Image (cartoon, rainbow, N blue to C red):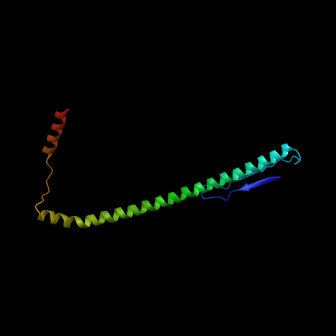
Amino acid sequence: MPTDHTNPSTPSRPARTVSVALSSLPTTSPYSRTRLRYDRLTVEFADMLRGHQDAAERLISDVRDSQANRHVKRLASFSADKEARAADLPQRIIKLRASGWKRERFRPERYQDLCEAALAEL
């Protein structure tokens, strides 16, 4: 007597069908009882594996969704922080200049000195 086991489809893959034909030997001999028990255990094991696989796929999907949401939140937070810092920058510069801060202009001599010092170490 054939037994069909169908797994409900998930978005990631089509439905699977497993067909197992149980032994048609008479149930009187010890061999036939052993064979039927083996067939039954094999079908149960396949069902258990399918259940574990489906559970693992659900967990993976949940983690992917969670990570995607976290990434979107992080981007939104970064964007908001960047805008706040840009708006605050002129006020910070005014405050620093009032306390004596000067912006040093580009001087190529500094980099030439640094290069010479590095070469001298070699």
Extreme residue toward the top, this view: 122
Residue 120: % across, % down: 16, 33
Q: Quadrant of residue 95?
A: bottom left
Residue at 44%, 61% in the rendered image: 70
Residue 11: % across, % down: 60, 59
Residue at 14%, 57% in the rendered image: 103
Residue 100: % across, % down: 10, 61
Extreme residue toward the front, this view: 30
In the rendered image of this protein, does residue 73 appear above or below residue 115? below
Residue at 54%, 55% in the rendered image: 60
From the viewer's perspective, is 95 left or right of 26? left
- Count how many numbered circles sit on residues in the image: 0
- Nearer the observer, 92 or 35: 35
Q: Where, quadrant-wise, is the C terminus in this rendering?
A: top left
Q: Do we see residue 44 in this rendering? A: yes
Residue 68: % across, % down: 47, 59
Residue at 38%, 64% in the rendered image: 76
